[in-house]
């Protein structure tokens, strides 16, 4: 009789653990989708993410070196 209740407790905690884990994985996925805009460097054509891009004179550059050179 006690074994039966122990099994129920194990199954319930297993279900709770499964849902908690799913929740954290889901929220992590949502975060990675944000800020994924890519810009092409005007100088060398390299694609850089929104966070790393250098905007200068209405154009986008991948690095300070590309931003300095004219073209
Ligand atoms: Zn560049």
Image (cartoon, rainbow, N blue to C red):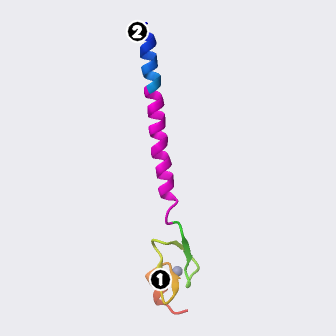
Residues at circles 1 and 2 in contact by the CB criterion of under 8 Å: no
Q: Earlier in the sequence, mark 1 or mark 2?
A: 2
In what quadrant of the picture does the C terminus appear?
bottom right
Q: Is residue 17 magenta?
A: yes
| Vertical order, 54 against 29 (above or below) | below
**Residue shown at the point (49%, 41%) measured from the top left:** 22
Magenta segment main secondary structure: helix
Q: SS of the residue at dot 2?
A: helix
**Residue shown at the point (54%, 70%) measured from the top left:** 37
| Vertical order, 29 against 20 (above or below) | below
Residue position marked by numbered label 1 in the rendering: 55
Compute the Cα span from label 1 to label 2: 68 Å
Q: SS of the residue at dot 1?
A: strand
Residue position marked by numbered label 2 in the rendering: 2
Q: Quadrant of residue 24?
A: top left
Residue 50 location, x and y as percent?
49, 72
Residue 62 location, x and y as percent?
50, 78
Crowding at mark 2 (Cα within 10 Å: few <14, some 14-19, many 20+): few
For ligand 1, tell me if the residue under mark 2 lies within 8 Å: no
In what quadrant of the picture does the N terminus appear?
top left
Q: Nearer the viewer, residue 51 or 15?
A: 15
Q: Residue most toward the bottom?
A: 70
**Residue shown at the point (48%, 34%) measured from the top left:** 18
Q: Is residue 25 magenta?
A: yes
Q: Which residues are magenta?
A: 13-35
Front disc: 1 or 2:
2
Crowding at mark 1 (Cα within 10 Å: few <14, some 14-19, many 20+): some
Residue 39 location, x and y as percent?
55, 76
Residue 63 location, x and y as percent?
46, 79
């Amino acid at each position: 009789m006690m074994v039966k209740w122990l099994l129920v407790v194990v199954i319930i905690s297993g279900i709770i653990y499964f849902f908690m884990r799913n929740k954290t994985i889901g929220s992590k996925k949502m975060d990675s989708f944000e800020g994924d805009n890519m810009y092409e460097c005007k100088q060398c054509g390299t694609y850089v993410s929104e966070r790393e891009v250098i905007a200068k004179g209405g154009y986008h550059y991948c690095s300070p070196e590309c931003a300095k050179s004219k073209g």
